[in-house]
Amino acid sequence: MEHSKPPSTTDWLSQKSGVALSLGLAGTALVVLVLALTLWQVNITAHSLKERLLDQATQLAAALGWEDAETLAQTDLQQRAPTPDAVKRQLEGFSSLYEHLRIFTLIPRDGAFLFGPGSHDNTLQGQPYEARTQSLDTVLNTGQPLFSGKHDNGYGHHARALAPILHPRTGEVLLIVKVEIPAAVWNQFLRQTFLPGLIAAILLVALFAVIILRVLGPSRNQQEEQGAGIVFLVTLLIGLMLTGLGTLLAQQIGLQEQERSFERQASQHAQRLREVMQRASDDLHTLARFMEVHGAQGRMDFSDYVRPLIQRSPLQAYMWVPVVTPETRPFMEWEAQADGLTGFRLYEYDPLGGIRLVPEDSLKIHYPALYIEPPGKGWSTLGFDMGSQRHHRIALMRAVSTGRVIGTPPVPLLFQDQAPDDRGSLIFKRVETRTEPMMDGDLTAKGLVAAALLFQDALERVMGMHDVQGAQMLLQLVALDGDNSPTVVARHPGTHNGLEESAPAPVETPNFLPHQAVSLNRGSEMENLRINLVSSPFQRAYPLLEFDQTHALVAIPRKDFFDDHPVYGTWAVGLLGSIMSLLAAFMAFMLRSRQLSVDRLVELRTRELEASRAQAEKANQAKSEFLSRMSHELRTPLNGVLGFSQLLEADPELNEEQRENVLEILHAGRHLLRLIDEILDLSRIEAGRIQISLSPQSLDSLFDECAALMVPLAAEHQVRLHRTQATRLYVQADPLRLKQVVLNLLSNAIKYNIPQGEVWLHAEADRTQGTVHIRVTDSGRGIPPERIDTLFQSFIRLHEREAPEIKGTGIGLAICRHLVELMHGHIGATHHKPQGSIFWIELPMAEPQEESAPEAARPGAVDRA
């Protein structure tokens, strides 16, 4: 009987639809992986942008300082005042250095926020800030800077960062600096970062679509021959695409680490330069206080006080600039000459005639440099009227009117040991005196203290003794004026003692950086310098808001920086990914070639097996027919032999020897008849012509019949047969074939037993599985475990050598296996310790067709348990 085998998973996948589905799932997984990597890259980029914006806000808060913030917090912002005007000019100047950057200040007052000075839309100053968010409250409560994300605050959709300025003693938030850029610029840059991954995903979708259509198309031998090459190219292409995406991601991570290192170093330089300028301002405050208390008692007193300041101060020279009216001029000149300044005269700058002596009849108020320390540092400035030069006069008058430390814009300062193009700033601080000692607040200026700050010298102090070779970045100190272009006033590496040092190589940055670094000589105007905070990660500007002037330290990494901070991960990922792509493509090529070879070999072997199977089936059918006919032909004469033997056995005239011979003929004939019947059964089973009729069968009655039939055989071999009660146990089976199987198992258990041995016939139900187990257990020789698997094969006799006297053909158990399987059951055997064996049958449980009374026990040779 032939049974159709269901198709396996391998057969299903070998079909076109299965292959197409597998390719679709693989393509989907790759596309999802590509998009996930791309989103990871976008997230890294967004995090880097947040850090840049937050760092810019923090730097601005540090540059403004808490003194100005405290003044702003106490000032009527809707009225003109020196501090708000100065902060406004500084923020406007600094924002002019950036593209798209807007700077605002917010001042907490009476539970609300007011607009302070800002870089844009100064009509808002002093107005309530209506777009209060939770981010502002968080900064106000924690005192920590915060990136507040993208918001539509009523003034546009922007991404912004907040940084507070705290009072150093109370910790109170005095002012919050808000730095923002348009959300459109932010989103555009992130879209540019996402674009390569999106293109890669689209290409993957198109590639797999083409492959799937090719698979689903009609098969061609040429396509099969080209299949290995196509698999190689497709795998290599996918691998290279993933490698490229991974390289971009590794590059992004490496650039982020480089950017952090660059920002850390540059911010340290900016902080030190800010401290230098702050120290200069503090020194000038100290000198002004000294002059207010002690007055101008003489040049020697001034020099004695200033010399200790010079040793630690970044300022080049200190000056005392008195207020000289026409009435006090003669006394001042006489006092100067008496103090050792022989030939002291007042000079002024004439726009038409240059430097000249101040006429004796001049009615103007003059501000001459009377004392200069160190003495030989700036003799050319001695007696020069600071108010006669435009830039000096503006800064000087602002210092007189506001009382703040005011510096001039960058101007050439002609001091000794100074390069001709060195620029600096003259810094002024008002020295106050009381007009009436008993009246508070009635103050007037009796003069000013001034100092000269050389920008190049201050920058070199920060970098440390003109260390050109050790500098890893180009630092440019830029003067910013909202009305003019930014001007470079100092740079490192730069010049020293009037000689140009080894010129730095042009700023070399990786060609993938999305910016153009700007590097100019000192004094040059940078008309096109506009830093993009979003797309220029390696070009930073740090605010320096001292002396009511706006400066910025622009930092650009040099080649040495990138050599010292290499991005090995990019090369490693690219090289490793390329190698892995080639290996994967080669393996895919080999597997595809192997698959094609195996497919051809399988097809060939399948045809051969089909032919062999057909031939074997034909031979098997011929064998079965032969056995059936031979068995039929043998039964006819054998029945005649048995019939005549039975007649001879009934003859009373036979003597004892003759009777024994006749019995021997009968035994041999019956054995031969059983052998023929078994061969006929086996041939019918193999030919599929045996008939099985399944119906509920009572095991109790079956056990009684089988046990009764086995009693003579058990008595002959001196074996005791036991059976258990099988009341109300029914199985779905053919009654004749089940009886044949049980009798065969009992017969084998008796014949292969030992003298005085025992045989048990037992049955039990497994109602959870819906089956009944029948077991035949004996105490005989047992079965070696390694030979159990061969028990149910045809013509196998395990004890042929140990018990040659036991007759058999070795096909009884094979017939039992076939019969049990035809009844939808199972049969098997195990070794029974300490000796013997167990043969078991498992058949489906059945319900009885009708109730029957239990049978009464009857005496016999079989024990019932």
Image (spheres, rainbow, N blue to C red):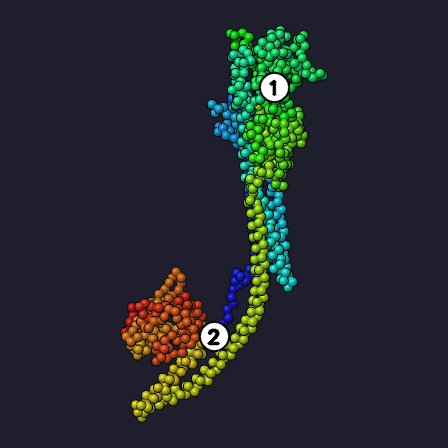
Q: Secondary structure at mark 1?
A: loop
Determine crowd level at label 1: few under 14, some 14-19, many 20+ residues with C-alpha closer than 10 A: some
Q: Residue at x 57, y 70 (%)?
A: 607
| Left-right relation of 219 to 141 | right
Q: Residue at x 47, y 83 (%)?
A: 630
Q: Position of residue 663 (x, y in %)?
A: 34, 86
Q: Are marks 2 and 1 in contact (CB under 8 Å)?
A: no
Quarter of the rendering occupied by the C terminus: bottom left
Q: Position of residue 138 (x, y in %)?
A: 50, 30
Q: Is residue 220 above or below residue 492?
A: below
Q: Position of residue 471 (x, y in %)?
A: 57, 34
- Nearer to us in this view, 394 or 726: 394
Q: Position of residue 9 (x, y in %)?
A: 52, 60
Q: Is residue 447 visible?
A: yes
Q: Is residue 98 above or below residue 617?
A: above
What amino acid does circle 2 point to? Glu
Quadrant hosting residue 818? bottom left
Most extreme residue toward the right is: 352
- Nearer to us in this view, 474 or 613: 474
What amino acid does circle 1 point to? Gly
Q: Secondary structure at mark 2?
A: helix
| Left-right relation of 287 to 693 | right
Which residue is tagged 2?
686
Which residue is tagged 1?
378
- Nearer to us in this view, 11 or 343: 343
Cα separation, mark 2 vs mark 1, equals: 125 Å
